[in-house]
Amino acid sequence: MINTKLSILIYLLAFFISPQSTIESNLSLLDNKIPTDTPLVFAPGIISTKNNKEFGITFNSEMNELFFTRKTNKKSFEIYMMRLKGLKWSKPEIAPFTSDYEWDYMPHINPSGDKIYFGSTRNLNDTTRAQDVNQWYCEKRDKKWSSAKLFGKPFSRKLIPSVTSSENGNLYFTYIKNYETHADANIYYAINQNGQYESIKKMGEEINSKKWISNPYIAPDESYIIYDAEKNSVSAFENADLYISFNHNGIWSKPYSLGPKINTKSYETAASVSPDGKYLFFTRSSLIDGDSESSHWEDDIYWVDFITLKKELLKKQ
C-alpha cells in the first residue's frame, strides 16, 4: 500500500519537475524496485515471467507505451505490448501487427516514435514464403499502428533479425549471411537520405571483431552502440556477453565489456536504453536444471542504472 501511494505521488510530482522524472515515474508504476548499480529483474510476474522467454524490450519517448518479445512453451515468438492508462499499465497483450504461427521478435521504436521495426518469418506476400528472417516495420498514424510493411531494397531478401534507429534516421542492424552455420553475423548500417536508404555498409573491425556480433542498440545521437558478442568460439547461442563502443568524431572505440555485474556465466543479450538514457535493459538467460525432459533455458529482462555505468566505462578510455 505504501509503495503504491509513493508511486502515485512520484507520478504526480513529475509533471511539475521534468520530462525525465515523468519517465521514471511511469517506470515506477510498473516496477517500484528501482535498480542502482546491480541489475534487477524487470517487472517480475508481469513482463518477466517463469517458464517463458522474454527479451527485446523497447519504449516510446513518452514512456507510456512499450513492446517486448515473449515465447511460451506452446507458442512461437510473439511481440507483446502494454500502454499506460492514467496511473495503471495495461496487461501485456499481443501486438495487433503480430502474425499467428510465425516468428515475430526484437521490436524497436525509433526515437521520434512514429515507426516500430521488428524481425519476422511471415510470408513476404500472398504467394511468397520467407526463407528466413526479414525486417518489417509499422508506422504510427493518429495514435494507431499501421499494418506491417516489408522493408524494400537494400534490405529485401537479407537475413536481418534486428534493427535500431538513431534520431536522424540512420539504421544499425544485424545481418547474418549464413543462418545455418551462423557464419559472418555482423553489424551493418544504412544512412538515411531523405527517407531512403541506398546501400548497406559493414561497420569496421572495431565493432565486428568476433565471429558472432548481433542485436545492436544505437544511442539516439550515435554517441555509443551496445551489442552482443560471443564469449568465445564454442557456439553462437547461449554464449553472449554485452559490449559497448563509443563514437569519437566518427571514430569508434574498441569494445568494452559492460562488466561482471552485467556479464555473468549465463548469457546476456538484446540491450536497449530508456528514452531518458538513465536505464539499461537487457535479457539474461539461465539454464534451469531438471531431469532430461524438464531442463530448459529461461530468459528474463533485467534493468540497471546506466548513467553511472556509462561514466565508469568512459573512464576506461
Image (cartoon, helix red, strand yellow):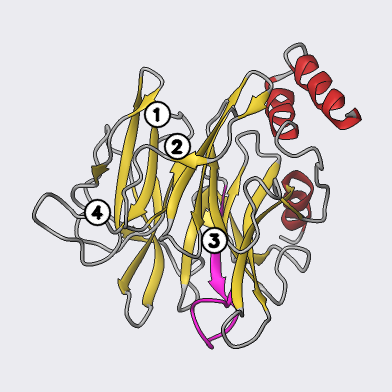
Measure the C-alpha gap from mark 2 to mark 4: 17 Å
Quarter of the view holding residue 197: top left
Q: Closest to the observer: 52 or 269?
A: 52
Earlier sequence position, callout 2 versus callout 4: 2
Residue 50 position in % (x across, y down): 65, 60
Measure the C-alpha gap from mark 1 to mark 4: 20 Å
Earlier sequence position, callout 4 versus callout 3: 4
Label 1 crowd (10 A; few <14 / some 14-19 / many >=20): some
Amino acid type assigned to the residue bearing label 1 in the image: Asp
Residues at marks 1 and 2 touching, judged by CB atoms closer than 8 Å: yes
User: Disc 4 on helix, strand or loop?
Assistant: loop
Can you tell which mark lies on residue 110?
2
Residue located 67% across and 82% down the image: 290
User: Disc 3 on helix, strand or loop?
Assistant: strand
The residue indicated by pointer 4 is 155
Can you tell which mark lies on residue 114?
1
Identify the image quadrant of the C terminus: bottom right
Residues at marks 2 and 3 touching, judged by CB atoms closer than 8 Å: no
Q: Which residues are magenta?
A: 224-241
Measure the C-alpha gap from mark 2 to mark 3: 17 Å
